[in-house]
Amino acid sequence: MSAASRRAVLGGALALAACERQAKSAPAVYAPSLKSVAPFPIGTCAQVSHLQQPLWVDLALRHCNRLTPEWEMKMEYVVQPDGGFLFDRPDRLADFARDRGLRLHGHALVWYAQKPAGFLNLDERRVSFARAYDNYITALVGRYRGVAASWDVVNEAIAEDGDGWRDSLWAQKLGPFDHMRRAFDRAREADPGAVLFLNDYNLELMPKKLDSFLRLTEQLLKAGAPLGGLGTQTHVAADTEAGAIGRAVSALGQMGLAVHVSEADVSMTRAQGMFASRAERERAQGRLYAEAAEALLALPPAQRFGLTLWGLRDRDSWLRNENPTDSPAIFDDSGNAKPAAAALAEALSRNR
Ligand code: XIL
């Protein structure tokens, strides 16, 4: 090989290496403060461990004005085996929200997935199940009265296949419909000012589930339950069909209640679809976040409850437990804005 052609080959290899370096460290993305551009609240889920991380706190305060406790206000945390309640961490989350001026969205009072030992082993000769159930809701909602402006009262009531309601300890003990109705009534008594939600997932993916959710909404309203809002969790994958999120949000809006995109994330690793490149997949992710924002913006202002991100940074996401390589959030592990953050900010500001 001549010296000239060796130079050409080496030069080519260097250029290629430079290209790859560039591809790995994508160009910096700028996203303005989401809460400043959004005409409705922007939320994040949070755990007490986040509050001790200055970088997380900076990011949350820059972009968000609502906080949903990720699990430390759930029964699993609060209800102790002896039936007592533990409020230490819920208090810290509530104090943080109050001190830093974020709205607090309580989550979640009744959830089929959680049936703590304190309820399973309840001595019903001493205290009836209904009494213990009432007492729990009254204690929790009452404690944060005036601090939590809203609550997910019943979480994930609709069956997995969308056909009817889920079976649960609560349904078995207190009745499939009555336990829901009862939870709404107790929450209303404990804090008459809080907006009370029914919250569920896969509503954008399963028309049957969405339909059952809307029928349950009607039934609760007809029975006089103080239901004030509908939450669509919006845990989707990057290959979710365009328009699906918008259709679900708009259908919920038809009920005339407040609508919350309550737990938004867009999984990359759950996506089955083929993407030509990483950049293409990131664009798809951004479009879905943007679609959620646009769908809320299409509702009458009074019904736009807000958009809550289920994990600010990729490393904060619960989906990392399922797949450690997933990157479903709008900020990367270091808190840098990803293309999805820019797409979301753009959608929010475009429609002001
Ligand atoms: C998840 C949290 O993110 C996890 O940290 C926790 O261990 C389990 O629950 N639907 C819901 C949320 O309503 O409460 C769930 O959050 C995610 C699915």
Image (cartoon, rainbow, N blue to C red):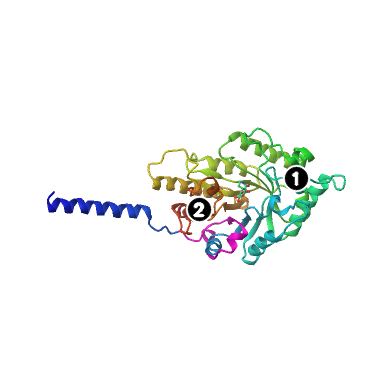
Reply yes or no: does residue 46 show up in magenta: yes
**Residue type marked 2:** Asp
Query: Which label is found at residue 225?
Result: 1
Q: Is residue 100 above or below residue 274?
A: below
> Left or right of 297: which side holds 166?
right
**Residue type marked 1:** Ala
The residue shown at (13%, 53%) is 4
| SS under mark 2 | helix
Q: In this view, does 127 lie above or below 206?
A: below
Determine if residue 288 is in view.
yes
Q: Where is residue 16 in the image (x, y as percent from the top left)?
A: 27, 51
Determine if residue 191 is in view.
no
Mark nearer the N terminus (1 vs 2): 1
In front: label 1 or label 2: 2
Q: Where is residue 217 in the image (x, y as percent from the top left)?
A: 69, 41
The foreground one among 313 and 124 is 124
Q: Position of residue 36 (x, y in %)?
A: 53, 61
Q: Is residue 175 above or below residue 42?
A: above
Q: Does the residue labelled 1 lie within 8 Å of ligand 1?
A: no
For label 2, the residue is: 314
Q: Position of residue 188 (x, y in %)?
A: 76, 52
Reply yes or no: does residue 57 show up in magenta: no
Seen as rendered, the residue at the extreme front is: 1
Query: Which range is magenta?
Result: 31-54
| SS under mark 1 | loop
Residues packed near mark 2 inside 10 Å, few (<14), some (14 to 19) or many (20 plus): many
> Left or right of 34: which side holds 111?
right
Residues packed near mark 1 inside 10 Å, few (<14), some (14 to 19) or many (20 plus): some
The residue shown at (17%, 54%) is 7
Seen as rendered, the residue at the extreme bottom is: 99
